[in-house]
Image (cartoon, rainbow, N blue to C red):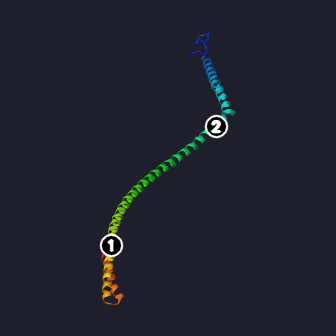
Amino acid sequence: MAPILYDYCKIPMGDIPKEDRDKCCKLAVGILGLLVIVLLGVPLIFFIIKANSEACQDGLRAVMECRNVTYLLQQELAEAQRGFRDAEAQAVTCNQTVMALMASLDAEKAQGRKKVEELEGEITTLNHKLQDASAEVERLRRENQVLNVRIADTNSASPQDSSCAAEPPLLILLLGLGALLL
């Protein structure tokens, strides 16, 4: 074993009795152990004192509070992200609905335009029929006047009941109008 102190031992090792050497080794080990305990114990005591100080306790409380706040913020962020995803899903659904409604509206517009064109065609046809019927009525009115003049001329030649003479032209006029409407 190497000497603990770097002194020159004046007594040869062989001259020191074994019991004294054992005591010396035990003493050296004890001093070394005590030295290790003191060297490790002093910083440990200093650390314990520092760890239990008010500033350190405040720091630990601040760290715990930060962890709690961070946890709450993470929960709020997760909730906000879920809300955002839900809103995005609703926006997609709304956009699809709007697109479907726009397509339906376009189809309805096209159908409405087609119906308007059909109705305009019918109106044009009915206007032509009305013009034709008006011309026919005018023609029949002229014929009626001509017939009335003839009847008046024949009545003046032969006196008869004038109410019977006016009925045939009116009957002809009504029959002509009925034929046009069919």
Residue furthest out toward the front? 157
Q: Amino acid at mark 2?
A: Ala
Q: Is residue 51 above or below residue 141?
A: above
Residue furthest out toward the right? 54
User: Mark 1 or mark 2, which has the lower sequence index?
Assistant: 2
Q: Viewer-proximal residue, 126 or 71?
A: 126
Q: How many marks?
A: 2
Q: Position of residue 151 (x, y in %)?
A: 31, 84
- Say which residue appears at 54% left-offset and 44% top-offset: 77
**Residue underneath mark 2:** 62
Q: Name the front one of labels 1 and 2.
A: 1
Q: Position of residue 167 (x, y in %)?
A: 34, 85
Q: Is residue 150 above or below residue 42?
A: below
Residue 3: image quadrant is: top right
* Rendered image: mark on residue 133: 1
Q: Amino acid at mark 1?
A: Ala
Is the C terminus in the top left, top right, bottom left or bottom right quadrant? bottom left
Q: Position of residue 39 (x, y in %)?
A: 63, 23
Per the model, the C-alpha gap separating discs 1 and 2 is: 101 Å
Q: Viewer-proximal residue, 120 or 20?
A: 120
Is the N terminus in the top left, top right, bottom left or bottom right quadrant? top right
- Say which residue appears at 47% left-offset and 51% top-offset: 91
Q: Position of residue 109 (x, y in %)?
A: 39, 58
Query: Could you classify mark 2 by the number of other residues whose Cα lies within 10 Å: few (under 14), some (14-19), or many (20 or more)?
Result: few
Q: Is residue 137 above or below residue 98?
A: below
Q: Viewer-proximal residue, 106 or 168?
A: 168
* Rendered image: mark on residue 39: none
